[in-house]
Amino acid sequence: MDTIGNQSTSSMAETKTSSPIRASTNNNVTKRLQTELMTLMMSSTPGVSAFPNNGDLLNWTATIVGPDATPYEKLTFKLSFAFPSSYPYTPPTVLFKTPIFHPNIDFSGRICLDILKDKWSAIYNIQSVLLSLQSLLGEPNNASPLNGQAAELWDKDPAEYKRLVLGRHRELTAEELAEGNM
Amino acid sequence: MDYNQSDELAQLQKLSNEYSPEAEGPLVSERISSSAITTEYANGDPVYQIKTAALPQKYSFYRTCRGDGHCGWRAVAFSYFEALQKTGSKQKFFEEETRLRSLANLFLALGHPEHVYEDFAEETYSLLRTIANTNDDGETLLATFNDYGTSMSIITHIKLLTSAWIQTHPEQFAPYVVPQTIQEYCQRSIEAANCEIENVGLSALADVLVKPAGFAVEVLYLDRSPGEEVNTYRFDLTDQHGTVLPASHTLRLLYRPGHYDILYRPEDIPQPIEQPPVFVNLTSTMSEHRPDFHGMAGRDDNLAIPGMSFAFPHQTNWAFNPLYDLPSAPVPTVSQAVPVPAYVPLPVPHQELLPPQSIPMEQPISPPVSQPQPSSIGRNGPFRPCTYEFEINHSSVSLPVFQTSQFKNSHFNVAHYNNPDFQPEAWNPNEEYKHTERSRRNRSQ
């Protein structure tokens, strides 16, 4: 409770300085992300995890394990989260770092998911995004694909689909991981 | 259509989808004259010209809200806090915090875990407490709402409240959101971070936030519909039978397609207390500032204390003792001063006990009666101590003013030690008792 009181007093003081919005926004983002980190560490959710890169709270690396009974079963995927200073009022930028074959994810790892765009809400958090992405792996939205081939094969040829998933998937090299940690 | 062209169109479509005008201006602006709206449309559509021309007469001021997709939510939230502050009751803030905290039950009913909303809600509670303990003209509130993080937290909180209210009252709102379900609608049009308030949301927000606090909401629609004035829609307080109840305050929003601002009627704005001019002809000042005096007089408790109005001992001498005994002297009687109490409402007992004292105070404010008197008093008053001062100031008009509630304790009064002509006030019990006796005699006659 004390921290909250101090926060509001300090933000009041900052409104009198020249760039009040920037200062207090960063303050709020940091506070929010710290809370999220605590929550993630206290409650371990099977199949998803996330941690800030080298102490930079605005850039995180997350891991998703492919859900059972899907072509992605037992595969792990690394993702990067970049949080804008207006987070949680604008969504984080989320990318798949591990190469993935999926109807709604392009070859650069960009994701087409409404909650990461116009349906974003401040009540979502890293954990709920990761869980949504995990379920997206098993339930693609084939109506608006980024990867047409994947959308077509999903229903038509599950075996070929699975082959392509496994063919594209590989563990990231140490350099690639480090690159994400910059 | 060949491939290249459709590709180009897709590209353009993508650009157009991603386009959002750069929102400018403060999140919530200072209060400005609404004639600015008229000016804005001076060269615009004739319908707008007519409608905006009529606007400033009824709604004298407005505040702009930044059009970043949250302006409607922000306008309601800001006006809600402003209305609370206007009530001037600390207790009211406490009640509201308690009420809003109790609304957490709505979130529980929807299965939202506490951590989802508590950070946002905490900013609302914290601002309620801050404003409750702030005694200013809304500067703190304005500064807080211009802090992006804090105001977005509060907006998110009230959006979540609205969403929860709609979802827990499906029978009321479901017909308005078809073909969507209530849940779809809330997710897409209320909870989404970047979505402007719509009618359903505004109605629910009024139900959950504004009306229980005793306020009504009025939306003025400025659009191209035919008519000479903006269309008004009210969300009134009603009882269970639909009867409209009086609201202690009305939040007013100006809606232009896609955007909300805050409007004020002249009576919504606390009148600034004008600084009394320092050395001026007080006769004219009096008439100009009459409304302010009216307001001030109500607060004055000292006025009721007998003897407190004796700011000028010397004046008392010339004004009362000799003249009151002269039957021919045109001294105003109490009955002549009767219209005056509306202006400096003296308690009735005071007038009855001390009619002579009340007369000089009221002289300047009943001009038709008192105007001819200065000369007669000046000539006839043998005990008036300073002829020079009297001549210069026409002081029978100006000096007694210093005994009114507003000036009595100011340095304009020579009884005040800061006055350059400071004269310690001497209270003469004999004199006062003599008056009282005489007034009793007069009354009994």
Image (tube, coloured by chain):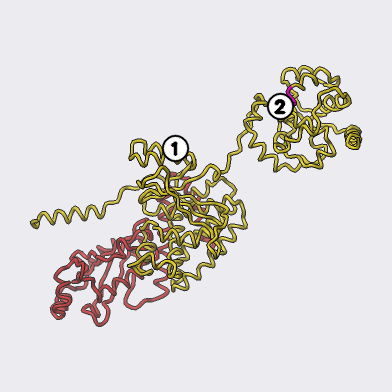
Residue B238 drawn at (x, y percent): 54, 60
Q: What whole-number distance in Å separates the C-alpha atoms at marks 2 and 1? A: 37 Å
Instruction: Tell which tag, 2 or 1, sits nearer the viewer.
Output: 2
Q: Chain of mark 1?
A: B
Which image quarter holds the C terminus of chain A?
bottom left
Tag shown at residue B367: 2
Between residues A146 and B216, which one lies in front from this camera angle?
A: B216
Measured from the top left, where is residue B82 in percent x and y?
53, 51
Please name the residue shown 80% across and 19% down the image: B376
User: Which residue in the rendered view is the most extreme toward the bottom?
Assistant: A69
Q: Which residues are magenta?
A: B367-371
Labels 2 and 1 within one chain: yes
Q: Is residue A124 magenta?
A: no
Secondary structure, mark 2, is helix
**Is A69 placed above or below A121 here?**
below
The numbered mark, 2 or 1, whose residue comes first in the sequence reads 1
Asked which quadrant contains residue A163, the reply is bottom left
Name the residue beneath numbered marker 1: B35
Instruction: Output the letter for the chain in yellow.
Output: B
Callout 1: SS: helix
- Assign the magenta stretch its main secondary structure: helix
Residue B369 shown left or right of residue B235 in the figure: right
Please give left or right for residue B307 compared with residue A59 in the image.
Answer: right
Q: What amino acid does circle 1 point to?
A: Ser
> Total of numbered circles in the picture?
2
Between A128 and B220, the residue placed more toward the observer is B220
Residue B337 visible in the current orientation: yes
Disc assigned to residue A145: none
**Residue B78 x/y as whole percent:** 48, 52
Other residues around mark 1 within 10 Å, as few (<14) / some (14–19) / many (≥20): some
Seen from the viewer's position, the closer of residues B390 and A92 is B390
Chain letter for the red colouring in the rendering: A
